[in-house]
Image (cartoon, rainbow, N blue to C red):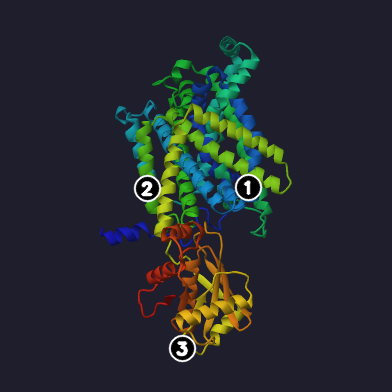
Amino acid sequence: MTTTALRAWLLSDLAPDSTAGPHATAHTAPWWKVMCLTGVDYFSTLGYQPGIAFLAAGVLSPIATLVLIVLTLFGALPVYRRIAALSPHGQGSISLLEQLLPRWKGKALVLVLLGFAATDFVITITLSAADATEHIVHNPFAPEWLDHPVWLTLLLLTLLGAVFLKGFREAIGLAVLIVIGYLTCNAVVLGVELWAVLHHPEYLTNWRTALFTTHGNPLMMVAVALVVFPKLALGLSGFETGVAVMPLVRGDEGEPEEAPAGRIRNTGRLLTSAALIMSVLLLASSIATTLNIPAEAFAPGGEARGRALAYLAHRDLGHVFGSVYDLLTIAILWFAGASAMAGLLTLIPKYLPRYGMAPDWVRATRPLVLILLLVTCVVTVLFQANVEAQGGAYATGVLVLMTSAALASTIDAKRRLGPTWAFAAITLVFAYTTIVNIVERPDGLKIASFFIVAIVVSSLTSRVLRSTELRITHVHFDEAAGGWLAALTAPTVRVIANRPDKGVEAEYAAKWREARSSHHIDSLNNVFFLEVQPGDASEFVNDNLEVSGVQIGPYRVLRCRSAAVPNAIAALLLHVRDATGRVPHAYFGWTEGNPIAYLLKYMAFGEGDTAPVTREVLRQIEPDPHWRPRIHLG
């Protein structure tokens, strides 16, 4: 394959809109089916959560899990129901914070949150693949030559990348089958184990004895549970995905897309049902594994390590049923990795190209898949495909995103005079949980810091390199401005750049005298004054430039607003050229000051030494110097 052919294949799936993603589709499904798509991420944590809970809390695992359930039902659930109401098109908490915080503050926060989101999704992929490997190598029917966890995990990741390179479409039907089968098997295993607990009272007696021997009294048990429960935060995953898939949730017939009340209501049902199902399963699994599995089985190399429920399925229901359970667990874990990959492929193109902080090819799936595949393979090697070792990093990503969602809900509640105190309290709880998790297991912060630094450095570099792109796709003149262009009879169009001020006639008279003296212009018949009001410079793309015409005395003034002043001037000059068939001449005054300072001002605020930047934008767009608008300095 030649270099040209390879590039064409990589970019063949380039999306026309950087905000489009895997969910940008007109097809919808009932909320319970979409819940299964969310469930491959949320419910799949049962594959490793019970073992991680026991390693973190020991015999306190059921109590610590109960604390986690309270946080789920009375913290995460109300927050994400509100997020769903505020972002019915799947924007999520990151997009809401961007809207709530102005200009560069919002963009900077988004870049930081993208680092933690990347941590969440990448570790979801690697941890799911690692736990799938645990279920493969510990299956009694698996050959010994498969007992190479790192290599087998890398193979699973490569297969996942190959599927996305071929082309991945989220199959709701497949997710429904996997989730129903997986939940059914878990219900059978947990039913058998809880029945055993009821028929063996000594299990509860032994557990109660161990609790009081280790912790002394109930108050101490609760206190320790409150300290250790952040380590169980993996059981909170899935809410962000639940909001992301909102465009797939079927609402009411004929409801307006701007206010889809039915979709919001059904997404609330989705989130509530998933949270209730998972809460029951988490509590039941923590009781079953803590009471029915000996502690030594959770030790390194133990049969229950990373696969506690699968261990019970094989031990108490036979290897045939246990193997079916393994296959369904491997399937849902792999699908969870696929869901996380799809989330990343949606999230990155949604923000970075719009900020000018990534090249346009980032909107294509295949190059991103190759980059993400490389990152996941490196993470797997660094963690040696160890499920428990990745738990802290995963929890950090999940908790930071939940804290950001709670913060967005708090800010919105304050603006709408809603229950601010309730959301503020939830935000504090999530912040505490995040800080405790980071202090005890800093791996997540280290990985997130790497992603944040990589994103910021590459983003700023890309922004600098792309600063002289035109950025504007359409220029629209209002009736007055368009009429002036249509009425032109002179062979030359002259545009005098003027910094917006009071807008009085004396201001333009002074500018006109200056232009006549510097550039020897004699007549006003073919002269326009141009004023560009700086907009939000943190925005890179400005699809439409709206130009209005204002008559002030004898002077015709074109006014517009843009994030980047030189780029807007260049786009307007090209539009005038194409509309009139004449090459326009633009006139500027020299800018006094340090050119480096003006360059930095342009990068940060969209204005600076305007004339040379305008010329460079025009040079890159129009290769023919004879057909290129002229720039004059005086």
Q: Quadrant of the C terminus?
A: bottom left
Label 2: how many residues lie within 10 Å, few (<14), some (14-19) or many (20+)? few
Q: Rounded to the nearest whole Å, what is the CA distance between mark 1 and mark 2? A: 31 Å
Tell me the residue that label 2 is attached to: 371
Tell me the residue that label 1 is attached to: 84
Q: Is 131 placed above or below 632 here? A: above
Residue 512 lies, in percent from the top left, at 54, 80
Residue 16 lies, in percent from the top left, at 46, 62
Whether residue 179 is visible to the viewer of this picture, yes or no, is no
Q: Is 26 placed above or below 51 here? A: below
Residue at point 55% right, 36% down? 399
Viewer-nearest residue: 33 or 510: 510
Labels 3 & 1 near each other (Cβ < 8 A): no
Residue 153 lies, in percent from the top left, at 36, 35
Identify residue type, mark 3: Pro
Identify residue type, mark 2: Ile
Q: Secondary structure at mark 2?
A: helix
Which badge, 3 or 1, is on the more N-terminal residue? 1
Tell me the residue that label 3 is attached to: 491
